[in-house]
Amino acid sequence: MSSSVLRRVSAAIALIAITLVSFAAPAAAHDPIFLSDDQTTPDTGPFMPDATISWALYGQVLGDGDTRGFEFDLRDGDELFVGLLIPNLEPELQLADDELPVLTISRPDGTTIDIVAEERVVFDEPFTKTSYVNLAELREPGMGGRYEGIVTGNAAARFSVAIGETELFFTDAERTGDRPSSFQEIEKPLRAWYTTPPGGEPTGELVEGDAEVDLDLIGEAMESGEGALAEGVDEDAVMADTTEGSENDEADVAVEEESVAESTDAATDSTTDDIEESAAAPPAGTDGDDGGGSTWVAPVAIMVLALGAGGFALSRRRNA
């Protein structure tokens, strides 16, 4: 085989490998923090002690010159990753590039860099079933020390800032307000941000299933090692399903399980009595030996049907 053919084969294999890796790459999740409208400067906004951890800041600017701030730390040798996004919704989608928010990052050495809209790439976030438009990203070797970030509005707009890439949930941070303490608690503030135009009232306009936390997907990510909880975080507490009605549903299932079990026990006892009576008294017209091999069929069939009916009812309830 010629060297040129070998090179082509190698290139094809490499391309296939890259494609497979890209399809297998896990979907990113972030630890959310919601900015309030009075967090206008870095020293009043959230402080994240480790910016290698994957954080997501959600906020809004109410007009030209309005600002929101935050701070984070890195260590020497860490990589800096920051992304600027908007929701994949109106009115942000109608804004021209020069009307979109600008993110300014101040490095520990005093230098600054502006992150401005340079692309519009739709990103569907599967863990919360929300959709965004990625405007720009910054990736560079980090410096040890304190970074400051300011989002400045050119028009009223919602925004999200992605920081870091290590999926470690519920890490302690400062100045985070009423931060959600479980995955399910993320839904309420996320829906409020997602359904409220900047400076407006909540529209409540959601496609069914949007802005809902997928606990199963989060659980799979943690089981696979793609995500983890910060040290000392109670997994049962943060993974609890606290949606309205979930506890009542579980109680109803427990009551029905007990009812089905009692019905099944009663049917079993009744069938057992029938079996004993049938064994003790052969049918009229037969003696103790003739036909005795078939007297058990009807009672046992009754028991099987009773057990099957109880199990079927329980299965339907659990799958409902």
Image (cartoon, helix red, strand yellow):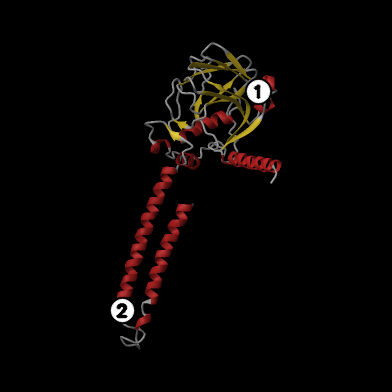
Point 50% across, 34% down: residue: 187
* Among the two numbered marks 2 and 1 on one chain, the one whose residue lies closer to the N terminus: 1
From where the camera sits, is residue 53 visible? yes
Where residue 246 sits in the image (x, y, percent)?
Answer: 44, 43
Single out the residue that lies furthest toward the top. 110
The residue to which callout 2 is attached is 279
Point 60% across, 16% down: residue: 113
Kindly identify the amino acid type of the residue bearing the numbered disc 1. Ala
Q: Is residue 202 left or right of residue 73?
A: right
181 up-or-down from 153: above or below: below
Where residue 82 sits in the image (x, y, percent)?
Answer: 56, 24
Where residue 26 sits in the image (x, y, percent)?
Answer: 54, 38
Number of other residues with Cα within 10 Å of mark 1, as a class: few under 14, some 14 to 19, many 20 or more: many
Q: Secondary structure at mark 2?
A: helix
Kindly identify the amino acid type of the residue bearing the numbered disc 2. Ala
Q: Secondary structure at mark 1?
A: loop
Which of the numbered marks, if any, corresponds to residue 7? none
Q: Quadrant for residue 200, please give it.
A: top right
Q: Quadrant for residue 303, please give it.
A: bottom left
266 up-or-down from 50: above or below: below
Q: CA distance from mark 2 to mark 1?
A: 86 Å
Along the viewing direction, whichever of 136 and 16 lies nearer the viewer? 16
The residue to which callout 1 is attached is 117
Single out the residue that lies furthest toward the front. 2
Where residue 152 sits in the image (x, y, percent)?
Answer: 60, 17
147 up-or-down from 246: above or below: above
Along the viewing direction, whichever of 210 and 46 lies nearer the viewer? 46
Q: Quadrant for residue 13, please give it.
A: top right
